[in-house]
Amino acid sequence: MEKKKVAVPLVCHGHSRPVVDLFYSPATPDGFFLISASKDANPMLRNGETGDWIGTFEGHKGAVWSCCLDRNALRAATGSADFSAKIWDALTGDELHSFEHKHIVRACAFSEDTHLLLTGELRKFCTILSSCTDIGGVRLWDVRSGKIIQTLDTKSPVTSAEVSQDGRYITTADGSTVKFWDANHFGLMKSYNMPCNVESASLEPKYGNRFIAGGEDMWVHVFDFVTGEEITCNKGHHGPVHCVRFSPRGESYASGSEDGTIRIWQMGPSTADESEALSANGSTNTGKLKIGVNEVSRKIEGFHIANDGQKREAILRSTVVVALAEPVTTIFGRFLSTLCWLTTLKSQCNVMLHKRFHHEVKPTLSCSLFVTK
């Protein structure tokens, strides 16, 4: 009998406390990059392929719960327990702006065009009236009106949500279930039971034939997307796995754990039968990302930071604030488009905008949308 090979990951040290969020940039002319958020208050940027440390964004005074990069990896954003969300220059590590909040910032995300930044916080006062019921789920919001346009119901709180690279699927993790939703019509496509409670899941971006999940059993599981059967199980972490993400080309994936390490695992090659079947279904994306100088310049101008002497401040045209009852587990790692965003909540919320009520209520999540164009 042939002995099964044991996967040996690249182990990335540096964080002194649990790693709670990971985010890969898309492929750029300089490669792709990985940013990590940790309770040690020091988000780090790494080479996405090798895991080599590039730099640490220094400035937060509390645990960092969320992190993201824009599509060209020129700007980074982080959300922290110090009641702030910060924008960073990803090339120099300089802090460009700090958005002050009323409570812990648990999530942040750039829009695809980098014109918008969404943050989510836990707070005790409603700035907008909301109501809720005691169910989990995913909410799709219209940025223009601030209203819910679609609800994806789940039995348990959603701890992870991701839109596939080709825009076809929304991947969610709730309890011990991983679900795949149609990102265009929002119907449930597939639902698989996991061997344990999972905190995060990610779909392979190139072929879409496999997905990964990590959770409380400390292992990173790889599954077949079509059948839901487990392909392999990667062991190595010494604490629950809080976050997993595929690299933009799908050749590797990263996991972040309670043990304070990031592990980058190489993806095994797809079989010829799998590739042919997926190509026939139109799900294979072999095109290369091309970004010209003008495109990069446009993205930089989209998120404009003014420099008045030594003082830097973001030029905000408008800010939309939405209060959502019950604490959140995450805000979706990227926008579906510049017109809508996705949130994952512990309860269903009906939000009425542009009405301000300052009655004290139980802790809520406030979503702030900063328009920077």
Image: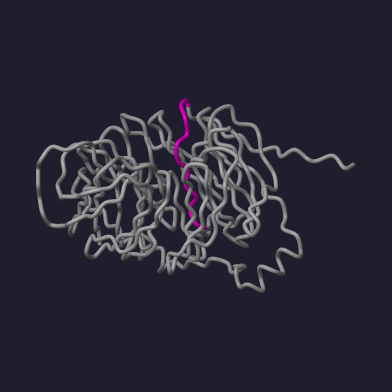
x 45%, y 36%: residue: 20
x 67%, y 51%: residue: 229
Relative to residue 180, is residue 41 depicted above or below?
Answer: above
Q: From the top left corner, tell me how far across and down residue 8 is, in percent.
A: 70, 37
Res 31 visible: no
Relative to residue 205, is residue 259 depicted above or below?
Answer: above
- Give the extent of the magenta segment: 16-26
x 48%, y 65%: residue: 182
Instruction: Indicate yes or no whether the magenta region holds residue 19.
Output: yes
Q: From the top left corner, tell me how far across and down residue 349 is, in percent.
A: 26, 51
x 49%, y 55%: residue: 171
Res 16 visible: yes
Instruction: Indicate yes or no whether the magenta region holds residue 301.
Output: no
Q: From the top left corner, tell me how far across and down residue 347 is, in percent.
A: 32, 46
Q: Nearer the viewer, residue 196 or 364?
A: 196
Q: Position of 285 compared to 86: left or right?
A: right
Q: Position of 126 compared to 263: left or right?
A: left
Q: Nearer the viewer, residue 187 or 125?
A: 187
**Residue 62 lies in what quarter of the image?**
top left
